[in-house]
Amino acid sequence: MKTIILFVAFCALLASPALAEEQHQHRRPDDIKQYLEHLDSTERDRYQKPDKVIEVLKLKPGMAVADLGSGSGYFTRRFIEAVTETGMVYAVDVEPEMLAYAKESVIHMHIPYTAEFILARPDNPNLPFESLDLLFVCNTIHHLEERSKYFSNLKSSLKSGARIAIVDFYPDERSGDLGFPKHHLVARDTIVQEMAAAGYQLTREHSFLPKQYFLEFVAK
Ligand SMILES: C[S@@+](CC[C@H](N)C(=O)[O-])C[C@H]1O[C@@H](n2cnc3c(N)ncnc32)[C@H](O)[C@@H]1O
């Protein structure tokens, strides 16, 4: 019974105009706590497959990872576990309240960690110079403007051989009913073209996510 109530609440949340609007436009959601809880919902795990995502990224202790558009910290916490306290995780978001929520959720893990919570500008993640082994971007790429310029500028934050991993919803029937219009989503081929223009080549592509493409790039 509890599961049914939670599922109905989740569907209602997806259908809510406030949430729907935020999903495809870069503006602050009206109810940020409700939005963050939605990002962290266990129902999401079914299609998001976070354990498998972490596994295929082949992270090792000591690595440095940035979670661009970290939201609730859904992936940030998993990166912290993967790279351990010997590594570094940068949670990066334009919303201070989301960063605070993510930080609080990391503290509640009660494990040692090394992380920074960075307030980004819409056109600049404010990441340190040559700091990253991996930049991870989940359901956030469609929020970014002038993406080729953004990722071209971002090269200065990458270590030699670093990867950029991009996961986002297919803008078609494969992503199912997302509860918001899909015209702000960006097609996989467009991302590949824009990343090529920014100076990156596609090196791996994972096809196990039912609703999203999952691409890995390195600088050419
Ligand atoms: C749909 S949420 C995805 C959150 C998280 N990546 C996840 O998969 O659970 C999009 C996030 O991107 C953030 N965001 C939007 N524009 C951004 C930008 N230009 N730079 C960094 N974060 C941004 C939003 O504040 C929000 O937290």
Image: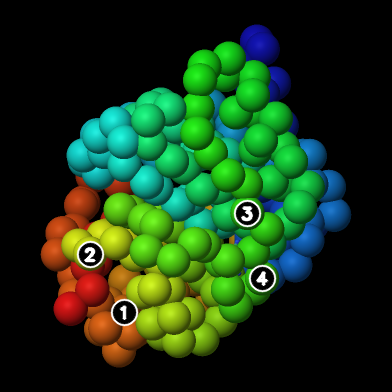
Residues at marks 3 and 2 touching, judged by CB atoms closer than 8 Å? no
Quarter of the image holding residue 190? bottom left
Identified at 63% across, 54% down, the residue is 118
Residue behind mark 3: 118
Which residue is more in the foreground, 33 or 101? 101
Residues at marks 4 and 2 touching, judged by CB atoms closer than 8 Å? no
Residue behind mark 1: 195
* Circle nearer the N terminus (4, 1): 4
Q: Secondary structure at mark 4?
A: loop
Quarter of the image holding residue 5? top right
Identified at 49% across, 62% down, the residue is 128
Residue behind mark 2: 160
* Circle nearer the N terminus (1, 3): 3
Identified at 43% across, 41% down, the residue is 88
C-alpha distance separating marks 1 and 3: 24 Å
Q: Residues within 10 Å of mark 3 (few under 14, many from 20)?
A: many
Q: Given this view, does label 1 or label 3 mark the residue nearer the observer?
A: 3
